[in-house]
Image: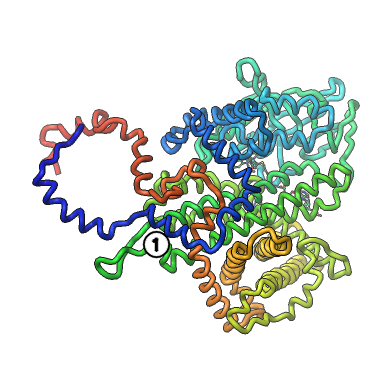
Amino acid sequence: MAHFVDARTRVLQEESTKAVLSNCSDPKADLAAERARATFDVGELLHYLNGGREKVERKAHFAELISRTEWGNKSERYFQTREEQYVHGLKVAFGIWDFMKEKRLGISDGRVLRSLVNAPGGLELHIGMFIPSLISHANPEQQAKWLPKAQSLEIIGTYAQTELGHGTFVRGLETTATYDSDRQEFIVHSPTLTSTKWWPGGLGKTATHIILMARLFTKGKDYGPHAFIMQIRSLEDHKPLTGITIGDIGPKFGFNGVDNGFLRLEYVRIPREAMLMRFAKITPEGDYVPPPPANAKASYATMMYVRSTIVQDAGKFLSMAVTIATRYTSVRRQTTSSKGQRETQVLDYQSVAGSLLPLLATAYALHFTGKVMMQMYTDFERSRDRGDFSNLPELHAFSSGLKAMCTTITSEGIEKSRLLCGGHGYSRLSGLPDMYTSYVQNSTWEGDNNVMFLQTGRYLIKSLLGAMTGKTLSGYAKYLENAQFEMKERCNVSTEVQWLDPAAQLAAFRNRAARLCVDAAEQLKQESGGNPVFEGEPWDNSNVIVIKLAVAHSQYVIYKNFMDSLQGIRSRGELQPNTVRALADLQGLFGLTVLEREVGDMLESGYLSARQVKLLRAQQRALVKAVRPNAVPLVDAFGFLDYELSSALGRSDGDVYRGLLEMAQASPLNRTEEGPGWKAVLEAQMKKPGSRSRL
Ligand SMILES: CC(C)(COP(=O)(O)OP(=O)(O)OC[C@H]1O[C@@H](n2cnc3c(N)ncnc32)[C@H](O)[C@@H]1OP(=O)(O)O)[C@@H](O)C(=O)NCCC(=O)NCCSC(=O)CCCC(=O)O
Ligand SMILES: Cc1cc2nc3c(=O)[nH]c(=O)nc-3n(C[C@H](O)[C@H](O)[C@H](O)COP(=O)(O)OP(=O)(O)OC[C@H]3O[C@@H](n4cnc5c(N)ncnc54)[C@H](O)[C@@H]3O)c2cc1C
């Protein structure tokens, strides 16, 4: 209702309003001023990072179109119940599907659309693991039968591996697939409580089919986990098939639009052809044909593919968080030292810039590592298709460690970004709480991070031991050939500026990793009482140092990838000198920030002196200052659209306070002026006779 304000009231207020306006914040102007400080061409970097101008424009065009659809509308995003989220997630998946068909779009456009809407739902695993499993584990006949149905959404699948009792230890799975040669069928069964499948995304209420990981028994012998395809729900009425019990596992820390599910099987029969037989096979008579020794771990290939995509995506999520925090802290003003002066942009506080700008640098580092990771996976696929599995061990070691490292960095980085946004960062309207709760699972799924680090550490120690007996190493572990030399090496930096040299930084990363590898191997030998044993007590008692080694190696790899990528850009002349300079500052800031955090190891080993650490810290602080003017331009270059970020604080126009006020209007609590509690509780309580005098 319009509210009448008399002239006297207005006149009295006028002076106070003027006083407040004289130094109140103007977020839009602040952000515009930040953009004017750019030392490089933002458009150039934007196009480079996003694969060209055409792709950038295409994404904006898609966002424009889908934001107008019912399924693409995000205004209710932060106010949905779990059920609404689940149903909406399905509408989004099918909405994107129809949109792709209508516009005849391919897989890479589909990926862009899914990322734009960012509403994880019941089809995540269908796209992320069910189809990839068919591609990597099914033989040509099986692919011909199942892929068209899966790709046209005639069936919806998921990947059912984890059980109540086992996730990490895949060989410990208890679901059985017992071959009956008389009927040429498998009997799949959940023999124990702990064999209940638990966690698979979409299993609860969506999937009609699953890739089942079960222990294969034939002729009384256990051949360990193998992949099978089977139907679990009717295609007519979506009810579970006979002998199958399925349901949703309940609410989770985040990611609640996805119906992670449970499954029990009671003597269910599936045909022999249900076993995915690209590698291992079973004959009609029940003879087991193992995969060739070189690809004994072939049934784990889907996990490796997904780990690679997780590495690829880590940089994107960190970039999103950093974009929100950088834009907001550039327009957020808080505290003034003298009256009448404008308050300080919080990004100008050393504590804020010192935390946020290294994260910005890290987001760039992860971008380049993500690219290298996917290239390595694609190369593996190419050689695998020729029957060459020789690069499998390195790919496994590389993807395991990077999966763990990149997701740790990004999980922590999202939370740090949220904290840097103060109170408004705690609001879901900032976009950061949801981003955190839905991202952080990446540290657990697809291999718990510590378990993944241990896989990488195992590979590195074995590589070192091999090198000591004269074996030539390849790839990222090559430096271990010189581990004995590294043990005697000392850092030769003697001035602050020498720390800017990428070679000096790389040498420090490499030396730390090499020494830790020698230390870890020593400890393992001691625990083993002689020759290193990579299992049981000796291994378990060496876990902490092995994980430390894998962290150090992964940090070395990420730094090296950043350095090599930038060198490539320079030598190919892909970007203008000013842009390269801005990226070089980020590379230095990333490198020195990580090294600064880890100096303890290098002081302990004697690689660094206390004076060199002081110089390193001073140079790191100088780089924070150097990056500061480019902060907003550098996040603009990531190219996230407002639609994509769904954040009141990350708005590209900087109008954050209007954003909060506008978005809050959609709260269901605001549907009526008096609110839902008035009729339900407040009225009766507050109108009780004598209610005010009771206390
Ligand atoms: C922990 C390990 C790696 C251990 O496996 P294991 O069979 O016990 O291994 P082991 O007998 O100790 O043998 C070790 C040996 O096997 C090698 N190896 C292990 N995994 C692989 C691989 N993928 N590729 C190539 N090689 C592999 C290791 O390097 C060892 O080799 P070595 O003996 O040293 O030469 C494995 O069991 C594992 O991967 N566990 C994690 C389970 C997991 O990732 N589950 C994912 C479920 S799906 C999911 O979470 C959905 C995510 C949804 C989404 O992302 O969208
Ligand atoms: C949101 C979400 C979605 C998921 N989706 C799916 C899915 O679609 N399909 C599917 O099959 N699974 C899925 N999972 C399961 C997931 O893959 C497992 O939870 C994960 O692999 C970790 O296994 P775990 O739960 O058994 O952990 P545990 O192995 O029980 O880990 C517990 C602790 O023990 C430590 N630990 C375990 N083993 C060792 C060891 N050998 N050495 C040292 N430390 C060890 C771990 O580091 C961890 O700290 C999902 C999980 C989540 C959270």
**How busy is the neighbourhood of tag 1: few (under 14 within 10 Å), some, or many (20 plus)?**
many
Q: What is the quadrant of the C terminus in the image?
A: top left
According to the picture, the residue beneath numbered tag 1 turns out to be 346
Left/right of residue 385 with respect to residue 345 in the rendered view: right
> Residue at horizontal 59%, vertical 65%?
578
The residue at the far top in this view is 236
In terms of depth relative to the viewer, which is nearer, 64 or 446? Answer: 64
In terms of depth relative to the viewer, which is nearer, 467 or 222? Answer: 467
| Residue 550 visible to the viewer | no
- Vertical placement of residue 418 versus 625, above or below: above
Q: Where is residue 365 in the image (x, y as percent from the top left)?
A: 62, 59
- Vertical placement of residue 65 versus 632, above or below: above
- Vertical placement of residue 396 versus 571, above or below: above
Query: What amino acid is found at the position of numbered circle 1 in the picture?
Result: Val
Q: Where is residue 141 in the image (x, y as percent from the top left)?
A: 84, 27
> Residue at horizontal 51%, vertical 52%?
321
Left/right of residue 540 with respect to residue 530 in the rendered view: left
SS at circle 1 = helix
> Residue at horizontal 28%, vertical 30%?
672
In terms of depth relative to the viewer, which is nearer, 81 or 33? Answer: 33
Left/right of residue 324 with respect to residue 392 in the rendered view: left
Q: Position of residue 525 (x, y in %)?
A: 77, 68
- Report the coloring of the rendering: rainbow
| Residue 616 visible to the viewer | yes
